[in-house]
Amino acid sequence: MAASASTLFVCSCERTMPLAPSTAGEAIGARVMEGHQFCGAELDRVRAALGRDGDVVIACTAQAPLFLEVAEEEGRETAPTFVNIREMAGWSDQAASAGPKMAALIAAAAEPMPPVSIVTLESKGVALIYGRDDLAIEAGRKLADRLDITVLIADARDVTPPRSAEFPVFRGRVRNAKGHLGKFELTIDDFALPAPSSRSKLVFGEARNGAVSNCDVVLDLSGGAPLFPAADLRPGYVRADPGDPADVERAIAAVGGLSGTFDKPRYVNFEASLCAHSRSGITGCTRCLDLCPTGAITPAGDHVAIDPAVCAGCGQCAASCPTGAVSYALPPADALMRRLRALMQAYCNAGGVDAHVLFHDGEHGEEIIVALARFGAGLPANVLPVRVNEVTQVGPEAIAALFAYGAANVSLLARAKPKHDMLGTQRIVDASNRIMEGLGFGAGLVRVIETDDPDALRATLDGSAKGKATDKPAAFVARGGKRGVLETALRELHRAAPAPVPVIALDKGSPFGGVNLDVEGCTLCLSCVTACPSGALSDNPEKPMLRFTESLCVQCGLCQSTCPEKVIRIEPRVDFDAWNAGTKTLKEEEPFCCITCGKPFGAKSSVERVIAKLEAKHWMFSGANAHRLDIVRMCEDCRVEKAVNESFDPHAAPPRPPVMTTEDYLRAREQKKTPFGEDERS
């Protein structure tokens, strides 16, 4: 948008904050309209701009509904872009020096974001209430006018029968549950129907196990363990503490609205052909499976499968995926990188120093930042807040790019008690710190800030270690898939590093690394080449050779697991020299040529090893059959021709000895006896 933005409105919000209009305008190449109350006394100036062609950026989010209404009145087809510089920069004890920061925020907001892909869930209102006593039946009464109710009671010993059969009531315990809003499937044990003649309490008939229930919504009032991992993130599954009346009423209200069609974002995109999960029944990469909190990811042969209806959008799968098979879509990695590039370039061009990028989400992080601005000291002038859907979506490519662009610190703002395990994010932070320290930027520059306290956030930001920003910032534009973006970011980071080194060792789980080969033990069977999902290991069609391209290696471990000789070991690292060197040869041998046609068809040492093992040691190739060894010395075409011409049956074996019965053994013993009736052996 930098080239097409025509008008930028920068408001002092009734002179409660200083402005840097010229710097902000230069950041996106726009004509600046400076004012003090665009939502009131100066609204006509905004109306006039919205009535003309050209892009409009308004540095205010508080009055966005008003400006959108004006845009609609003026018949504007494209909505203006909004950016919050008040709580993010202007309302701060360091506002006087926040001009570069305001320019950076405006430039980042002007970068276009692609549209969000939608996943549609449909619920017909078929609801199962799973409880332990009369409370479940009472909840069913409250919902019966809105939903198609079935009640399942786990412990129905003292449940009073309902006076009228408004909805069915059964006994049973949920053994297994899967699915999502509009498509739940529950397996129930101890399932039984009540007797119609139940008087003071429900009496149930014969029970059976393995009953299956399909429904659209599940209300869990059982008080037991959740039916799903990360249960609060499973659409259509609502759980409440049966001992807390307020919590039960909240759950009933939530379930009552779960009928109809619902849209949710498609958080991640998946390309199965890039997945390195498995090959030939051997498991390789399991990073996404290990990190998914909701169980949305499951094995599916050589790759995994991701259920978009279950995915809650934490993004740890995409952040940790080494191949780019899983990529975040809200926004895509390259779109986020373009926004980060605009942010850093505008900040540096406006004279900003020691940039500290703070990733935060909209639900938790933005509330803390706004509270800090309204009731505290606000954010420091060098802290550049970047809103993302989830901080756990931030991958190593974004962190590496920020330091290459000139950042001195990167932080991720999370809850004091995160909604789900942040193991994947912590691994990325640890690996990023090791890389930054190894390249001379400093130690401990990337961190996760877990807090719900605005003042604690400010204290942590003020006390952050100061990194050494590069004096030769990169300007690359991220394009393509996640893996390519990550590789480009690391190359640019190495180029911009204060003290670059050729190799940085990393922990297990790194998306980069090399392979160490025991050359003497390798037979060049090339099983590793067949198993490698990324093409890092390759052969040469012209001669026996094993080659390796380190920049393509994703450390999935399939080569190590597949190798029959166990001579391959993966090593997590970033080796910039190896990346620049391209493909290298790990082992090369002289080819063995067919004794009939002269065609090279295998490694000479391997063929000779096979011959040595068979020669005079196997009935097929010993004695009168020794000439058959020539078939091992032939290529695949000549081998078939010889086998056909000589009627060579590889399954034919020497005649077996005749079967001996008891009578045969007795007869043989009689024949061995001496004339005096004694056994010859005696």
Image: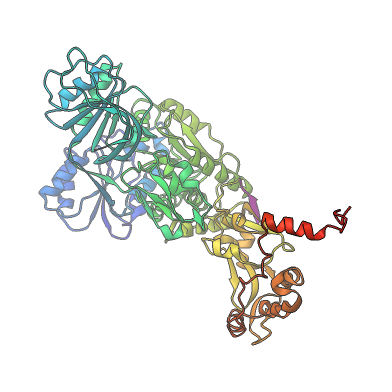
Q: In this image, 68 relative to 8: left or right? A: left
Q: Position of residue 445 (x, y in %)?
A: 55, 40
Q: In this image, 526 relative to 522: left or right? A: left
Q: Position of residue 171 (x, y in %)?
A: 27, 25
Residue nearest the viewer, comparing 602 with 610: 610
Q: In this image, 303 relative to 76: left or right? A: right
> In the image, what residue occupies the spot 41% across and 46% down?
297
> In the image, what residue occupies the spot 47% across and 37% down?
422
Residue nearest the viewer, comparing 176 with 139: 176
Outermost residue, bottom direction? 597
Outermost residue, top direction? 200
Work out which quarter of the rendered image holds the N terminus and state it.
bottom left
> In the image, what residue occupies the spot 47% across and 57% down?
485
Q: Is residue 12 above or below residue 472?
A: above
Outermost residue, front direction? 676
Residue nearest the viewer, comparing 483 with 304: 304
Q: Is residue 638 above or below residue 519?
A: below
Q: Residue 607, can we see it? A: no
Q: Position of residue 488 (x, y in %)?
A: 51, 59
Count of marks, rendered view: 0
Q: How is the image coloured?
A: rainbow
Q: Is residue 312 above or below residue 250?
A: below
Residue 442: which quarter of the image?
A: top right
Residue 526: which quarter of the image?
A: bottom right
Whether 237 is among the magenta residues is no
Q: Residue 156, can we see it? A: yes
Magenta segment, which residues?
501-507
Q: Position of residue 152 (x, y in %)?
A: 25, 27
Residue 640: which quarter of the image?
A: bottom right
Residue nearest the viewer, comparing 501 with 531: 531
